[in-house]
Amino acid sequence: MAFERICFRTLPDGSVRKVYPYHVSLEGMSQLVLCRDDEDYDVMVKCIFICARRKNVIVVIYIAMSNHGHATILATNQDDADAFKVEWLRMYSQYFSKKYRQRKVLRHTSAVALYLDSDWYLRNALAYVPKNALDALSRVEDYRWSGYRGMFCQGKTTSGFRRADTLTRREKEACFHTHDSLDGLPWILNANGELEPASTCDHAYLEAAFNHDQAFFLKTIGTVNMAEMQQKLVDNPRQRQNDTEMLKTIDSIAQGWFKCSLLDLPREKKVRLLPYVYRTFRTTIAQLARCFGLEPEEVARKVGKPRPAPDKADG
């Protein structure tokens, strides 16, 4: 059976919905170190899953690093993916601020959710996430704070581990830093109280993305261009591009979505592309109007924003 990037899944709220893949990155700006000890890494990972449950999304694979984190998720739409990224940022910042008595953490941390709009993009993102571990260790499989070890193991965890929903209230609050109910969750804690990714991640989705072939997954991890994916997934959405760069970006997306250049894109397809570009990149309505060749008022209406103020050309 061919892999379906867009598929149906049972969400945390129990509903069965069509879901789409997104890459979410949490980044400490100005050299802010987000994880300073093992507890911080553990909390960042647990925040991913608590926030996913709160915002009704599914986590496929993740990693927590010293000043950033990544997660590939399945969400019903961009709004839900954005809600997850905001909640992840909010919850971890709240923990971090309380522990270190450091204020204004939110101002120095950013989160971005990007739709993975092709099989190539998805597979490379799925490989990029665990490969970040090589910044800390020489082998991806040795990194503790990644979902990598939950892949291609048939969802099995070592016997003797404890289910999260059997914790007492005090144990739960100490372990997860939350009052949320964990009833009915299949999450498994290892001897160190850390979440086992085989019990939390949608490993079946990742395995299907690589045709149920672990060698294919490992080969992609080995060959993925980290600099390219860093630029696409992390840097570009956070940096303001001038008009020339934005035109190239939009044209590349148009080619991927519609097999058509931006110059030749029909109006109705431009309108379909507009909200995605607006939500995904750091841009303005005025800049999008210039690049798409549309009136600013129409662009504002299509992305659900008020009439824009005048904006200087970015050349």
Image (cartoon, grey):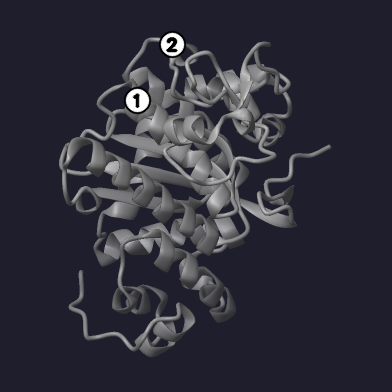
- Amino acid type indicated by mark 1: Glu
Task: Give SS at disc 1.
Answer: helix
Instruction: Identify which residue, 242 or 185, lies in the foreground.
Output: 185
Q: Left or right of 246: which side holds 105? A: left
Residue 16 coordinates in the image, percent (x, y): 76, 55
Q: Residue at x 67, y 20 (%)?
A: 152
**Residue 271 drawn above or below residue 121:** below
Distance in Å between CA atoms under marks 1 and 2: 22 Å
In front: label 1 or label 2 = 1
Residue 313 coordinates in the image, percent (x, y): 20, 75
Q: Left or right of 163: which side holds 4? A: right
Q: Residue at x 45, y 33 (%)?
A: 45
Q: From the image, which quarter does the N terminus lie in?
A: top right
**Residue 39 drawn above or below residue 60:** above
Query: As drawn, which residue projects farthest toward the right?
Result: 1
Instruction: Identify which residue, 11 or 268, lies in the foreground.
Output: 11
Q: Left or right of 304: which side holds 296? A: left
Disc 1: which residue: 39
**Residue 59 drawn above or below residue 38:** below
Number of numbered discs on residues = 2
Task: Give SS at disc 2.
Answer: loop
Residue 183 coordinates in the image, percent (x, y): 65, 41
Packing grade of label 2 (10 A; few <14, some 14-19, many >=20) is: few
Residue 176 coordinates in the image, percent (x, y): 46, 35
- Amino acid type indicated by mark 2: Arg
- For residue 22, say whether it is visible: no
Q: Residue at x 57, y 73 (%)?
A: 269
Disc 2: which residue: 139
Instruction: Identify which residue, 81 or 173, lies in the foreground.
Output: 173
Packing grade of label 1 (10 A; few <14, some 14-19, many >=20) is: few
